[in-house]
Image (cartoon, helix red, strand yellow):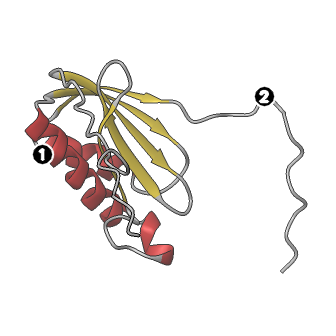
Amino acid sequence: MAKKANPKAKTQKKRKVIVESNGEAHVTASFNNIIISLTNKKGDVVAWSSAGKMGFRGSKKNTPYAAQLAAEDASKVAHEAGMRKVKVYVKGPGNGRESAIRSIHNNGIEVTEIIDITPLPHNGCRPPKRRRV
């Protein structure tokens, strides 16, 4: 006998994120990739993008051009949702930090402040031994 499909099973609810005109942009630039998240003041993600999401693979993911395209993609979605001003938090040593900020600004979102939150050790872990090539 065939079982009836449960109508409540596997239905995902789309959460509507409340967007104010002010928000935050978190740019994480590692050596291998760049991730841009645009959030509201509470910290709920409004839009995000990364170089890998834009179709870049391998060493091309940490280029300034990949960061620019990823930032454009995320800022278009956030601008349509109503975001107009952002504080930018930059984290990591990778390429493309400046180009990501520049392309967020060029897409109609005003950058009010840039804050570097790259974690720095206060002489924590011992570094790996020197490479001999």
Q: At label 1, which amino acid type do we have? A: Asn
Res. 105 image quadrant: top left
Closer mark to the observer between disc 2 and disc 1: 1
- Asked whether residue 125 is in view, the answer is yes
Comparing 22 with 103, the one in front is: 22
Q: Secondary structure at mark 1?
A: loop
Mark nearer the N terminus (2 vs 1): 1
Query: Foreground residue, 98 or 54?
Result: 54
Q: Is residue 112 visible?
A: no
Q: Residues within 10 Å of mark 2 (few under 14, many from 20)?
A: few
Q: What's the residue type where badge 2 is placed? A: His
Query: Residue 34, labelled with which disc?
Result: none
Left or right of 10 in this view: 78: left
Q: Is residue 122 above or below residue 58?
A: above
Question: Where, quadrant-wise, is the N terminus in this rendering?
Answer: bottom left
Labelled disc at residue 122: 2
Give the residue displayed 54% in from the left and 45% down from the top.
92
- Residue in the image at 37% along x and 51% along y: 10
Where residue 95 appears, as percent x and y from the top left, is: 45, 57
Secondary structure found at label 2 = loop
- Estimate how packed mark 1 is, as few (under 14), some (14 to 19) or many (20 or more) residues with alpha carbons within 10 Å: some
Location of residue 97 in the rendering, given as x and y in whole percent from the top left corner: 40, 48
Q: Find residue 3 and report its horizontal and vertical position in percent.
A: 39, 62
Q: Eyeballing the image, is 50 above or below 14? A: below
Q: At x 78% / y 28%, what residue is drawn?
A: 122
User: At 34% across and 73% down in the image, what residue appears?
Assistant: 55
- The x and y percentages for residue 107 are 12, 45
Q: Residue furthest bottom?
A: 133
Q: Which mark is residue 107?
A: 1
